[in-house]
Image: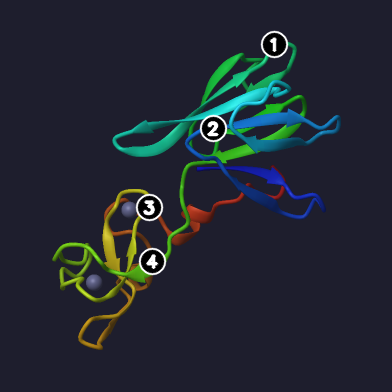
Amino acid sequence: MFLLRPSDDGLGWVRQRILDEGAALLPTGGDTVEIVAGRHPDAAAHVLPFVENDRESAALVVAASGHSMFVNGCPPLGLAVLDERAELVLNGARLYFTAREPLVVARYAGTPDGCALCGDPLEGALVIACTGCGAITHEGTLGDGRELLCFTHHGRCPRCRLTREDFVWTPPEDG
Ligand SMILES: [Zn+2]
Ligand SMILES: [Zn+2]
């Protein structure tokens, strides 16, 4: 899972990974926050991942007293859940949350199974394992030298229907 914060040059977003130990959001004096792993005594808020159905899908955010925190525009909160694409505004600094890991193409190394789209064997093939639902789909050469780009041809995960772009989402330009 990640917090997205505006990049220092103001163009685009920095995707900062949140580890199992959580993260501390440190005030910088301006309209940004610094994100560091674990706990910190000076943190304005802490973000703690939680696991649902064996997957990290959301996080808890806890504000320290004396700091202003809004989640999805709700009036000042001390404690809130960050769901997919939640907006977090901490002392005026705007961040976004996403639990989705970018999709990667890798050689299949699991037990014998079939592609979630075409059903052909996965053994030895280049595949995409969906980081949202776990479905595995051909995406390159197979063990026998043929090539199947099932994910690309379908345009989305055949099970959860999320697209490649959904896994590398960034906030819209106008907020
Ligand atoms: Zn396939
Ligand atoms: Zn999926």
Residue farthest toward the top in the current orientation of the protein: 65
Q: Distance between the residues labelled 4 and 2?
A: 33 Å
The disc, 3 or 2, on the residue closer to the chain's N-terminal end is: 2
Q: Which label lies toward us, 1 or 2?
A: 2
**Of label 4 and label 3, which has the lower sequence position?**
3
Which SS class for mark 1?
A: loop
Q: Quadrant of ligand 1?
A: bottom left
Decide if residue 17 is on the left or right side of residue 173: left
Q: Which residue corresponds to mark 3?
A: 131
Q: Which residue lies furthest to the right in this view?
A: 29
> At x 16% / y 66%, what residue is drawn?
114
Please state the horizontal and vertical placement of residue 124, each as a whole percent of the image: 23, 76
For marks 1 and 3 on the same chain, the one whose residue lies earlier in the sequence? 1
Q: Under tag 3, what secondary structure?
A: loop
Residue at 33 percent across and 59 percent down: it is 157
Q: Which callout, 4 or 2, points to the residue nearer the camera?
A: 2
Kind of residue indicated by mark 2: Gly
The colour scheme is: rainbow
State the residue position of label 2.
Answer: 22
- Rendered image quadrant of residue 85: top right
Give me the C-alpha separation between circle 1 and circle 2: 19 Å
Question: In front of the other: label 1 or label 4?
Answer: 1
Label 1 and label 4: CA atoms lie apart by 46 Å
* Residue type at tag 4: Gly
Residue that protrudes farthest toward the bottom in the picture: 145
Residue named by callout 1: 65
Callouts 4 and 3 close, C-beta under 8 Å: no
- From the image, tell me which residue sits under label 4: 155
